[in-house]
Image: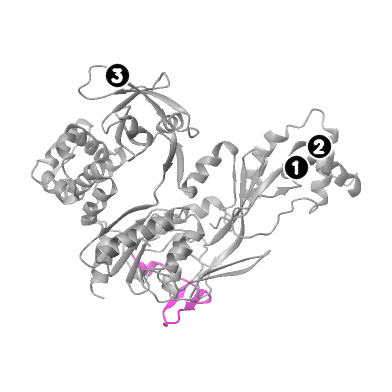
């Protein structure tokens, strides 16, 4: 999604949209068009105004004068309804209803949710800067954000939050979202906490001044071996390009000559970030992507002469949850014959939204264009069966066997395109990988399903970290933590923990899932100590798709 910052006063606000509620109830042919437009203009000027932030193009938006029935119905309601018209309340019901009849990505964002929607795109929020876990109905601090407000006042990993502003949050089964809302707030405002710390007899009181907390979209970057670097991008935000460049420069200094860019489970975000990152791989003048819509002229984005990775071999990992900006990057790499796409077919979101904000802080994100990969293919999957069917498509793919068998996927010849290098690619429903990797089901068992549903590996890993934090915090690398844990009876302890949660671990199921579970536990413990730099190098052992990519890249 491409964000262009430009606010503009609009004449016609959300009140026009509200009248859809009464379309079909009142016939407006009783009134003249001239008188109606006068009433509308007066009422809009009196009740509302708004601003627009474009996502995708600079064109304006006009909602009035398109339908005589709408104008007439509005006149009728505003002038003859028995009571005063609650325009604001009607808007909150009607605007989503209108957008629901369009594509699945045109949405209404209420003012109360606007910050939450925008945080992943802006790359920060205001809060106290802690990562926490709900451990037995208690807020347990996994770690404070480095140099964040909590760390600066002395909050430590393992602390329990007992009270927030006098409200008890420990042992009361409070929803984690509610606790997050209590801890977040406007930058510069204070929040008072009472903390229980192991070894301290009473509660410790802290006043923390909220500040901007970064949301990192590059989860991790590290060297897999002496030549192959790995970068995991979880989303595309305003900060992603800079994070990516910093990661690449670090890996280059460590000898990287080949790179794996992991876009699995990356649902997209800001289009510009994907374009800038793609530019790092392509030669000057190569087409990255173009957008076009009914009222939006074609706009091409080309690679430039600058780029840190033009000579590096590249593999891009995708799966069924890779969407939008992720598909732009993968599609450009594939269509320019620049590297290999490995994994499973991507989600299939090829629409560009434009954001219009209203004076009350709410907004509409309206689809105004489609984007096309360099060969000219639209990868947007069909949405004519409605939103529910659209989002259930992933489940249908699974049931159809697509996650396990590439041959279950078929495309029409009308959607066939050919890259400059002669590779056949298809549009109309996501990016098909060059190398298909099925879901690894070798470790599946009923035990794994029960453990996963209850979150037992997460819970055990945190409990274990909490009990052995002093020893674990002496370790600075994933390999140190792994070596330490390998000398312990970790699976025996986990089995006892699972039994205490009424999950019996039989030997037959442990033979199937035990290694996977043990690797997960080690990775989660390492994450509690070293963040993602600890998690990803350990979980790689059971990451089948990543290991296929490593083998493929090593052979080039």
The reply to whether discs 1 and 3 touch (Cβ–Cβ < 8 Å) is no
Name which residue lies at 74% across and 53% down.
62
Image coordinates for residue 186, horizontal then vertical, percent? 50, 33
Q: Locate residue 49: give its quadrant.
A: top right
Comparing 342 with 195, the one in front is 195
Q: Earlier in the sequence, mark 1 or mark 2?
A: 1
**Which circle, 2 or 3, is nearer the viewer?**
3
Give the Cα distance between marks 2 and 3. 59 Å
Image coordinates for residue 477, horizontal then vertical, percent? 19, 49
Residue at which label 2 appears: 77
Q: Locate residue 403: give its quadrant.
A: bottom left
Horizontal side of residue 22 vs 235, given as left or right = right
User: What range is drawn magenta here?
Assistant: 404-426
Question: At numbered mark 3, what does the secondary structure look like: helix, strand or loop?
Answer: strand
Image coordinates for residue 39, horizontal then vertical, percent? 86, 41
Give the Cα distance between marks 1 and 2. 8 Å
Residue at which label 1 appears: 19
Comparing 344 with 445, the one in front is 344
Comparing 7 with 469, the one in front is 7
Name which residue lies at 31% across and 30% down.
155
Residue 470 shown in magenta: no
Instruction: Name the disc covering residue 203, or none.
Output: 3
Residue 409 shown in magenta: yes
The reply to whether discs 1 and 2 touch (Cβ–Cβ < 8 Å) is yes
Question: At numbered mark 1, what does the secondary structure look like: helix, strand or loop?
Answer: helix
Image coordinates for residue 322, horizontal then vertical, percent? 42, 58
């Amino acid at each position: 999604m491409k964000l262009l910052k430009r606010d503009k006063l609009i004449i016609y606000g959300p009140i026009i949209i509200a009248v859809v509620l009464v379309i079909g109830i009142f016939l407006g042919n009783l009134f003249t068009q001239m008188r109606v437009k006068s009433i509308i203009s007066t009422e809009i000027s009196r009740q509302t105004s708004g601003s627009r932030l474009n996502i995708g193009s600079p064109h304006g938006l006009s909602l009035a004068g398109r339908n005589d029935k709408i104008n007439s119905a509005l006149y009728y309601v505003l002038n003859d309804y028995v009571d005063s018209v609650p325009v604001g309340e009607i808007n909150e019901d009607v605007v989503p209803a209108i957008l629901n009849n369009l594509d699945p990505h045109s949405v209404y964002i209420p003012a109360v949710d606007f910050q939450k929607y925008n945080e992943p795109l802006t790359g920060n929020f205001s809060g106290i800067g802690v990562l926490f876990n709900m451990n037995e109905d208690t807020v347990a601090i996994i770690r404070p954000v480095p140099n964040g407000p909590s760390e600066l006042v002395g909050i430590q990993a393992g602390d329990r939050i007992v009270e927030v502003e006098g409200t008890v949050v420990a042992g009361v089964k409070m929803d984690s979202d509610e606790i997050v809302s209590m801890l977040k707030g406007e930058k510069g405002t204070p929040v008072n906490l009472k903390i229980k710390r192991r070894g301290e007899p009473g509660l410790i009181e802290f006043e923390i001044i909220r500040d901007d907390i970064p949301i990192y979209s590059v989860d991790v970057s590290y060297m897999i071996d002496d030549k192959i670097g790995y970068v995991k991008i979880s989303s595309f935000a305003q900060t992603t390009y800079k994070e990516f460049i910093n990661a690449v420069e670090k890996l280059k200094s460590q000898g990287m000559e080949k790179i794996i860019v992991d876009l699995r489970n990356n649902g997209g975000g800001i289009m510009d970030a994907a374009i800038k990152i793609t530019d790092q791989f392509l030669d000057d003048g190569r087409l990255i992507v173009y957008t076009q819509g009914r009222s939006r002229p074609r706009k091409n984005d080309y690679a430039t002469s600058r780029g840190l990775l033009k000579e590096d071999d590249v593999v891009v990992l995708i799966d069924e949850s890779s969407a939008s900006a992720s598909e732009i990057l993968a599609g450009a790499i594939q269509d320019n014959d620049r590297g290999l796409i490995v994994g499973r077919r991507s989600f299939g979101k090829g629409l560009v939204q434009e954001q219009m904000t209203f004076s009350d802080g709410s907004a509409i994100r309206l689809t105004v264009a489609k984007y096309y990969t360099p060969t000219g293919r639209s990868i947007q999957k069909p949405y004519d069966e409605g939103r529910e069917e659209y989002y259930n498509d992933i489940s249908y793919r699974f049931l159809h066997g697509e996650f396990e068998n590439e041959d279950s996927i078929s495309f029409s010849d009308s959607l066939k395109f050919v890259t400059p290098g002669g590779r056949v690619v298809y549009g109309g429903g996501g990016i098909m990988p060059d190398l298909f990797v099925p879901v690894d089901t070798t470790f599946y068992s009923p035990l794994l399903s029960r453990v996963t549903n209850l979150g037992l590996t997460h819970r055990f890993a945190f409990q274990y970290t909490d009990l052995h934090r002093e020893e674990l915090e002496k370790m600075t690398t994933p390999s140190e933590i792994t070596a330490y844990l390998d000398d312990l009876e970790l699976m025996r302890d986990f089995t006892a923990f699972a039994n205490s949660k009424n999950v019996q671990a039989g030997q037959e199921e442990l033979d199937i899932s035990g290694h996977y579970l043990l690797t997960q536990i080690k990775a989660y413990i390492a994450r509690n100590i070293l963040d993602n730099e600890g998690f990803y190098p350990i979980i790689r052992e059971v990451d089948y798709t990543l290991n296929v990519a490593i083998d493929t890249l090593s052979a080039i």
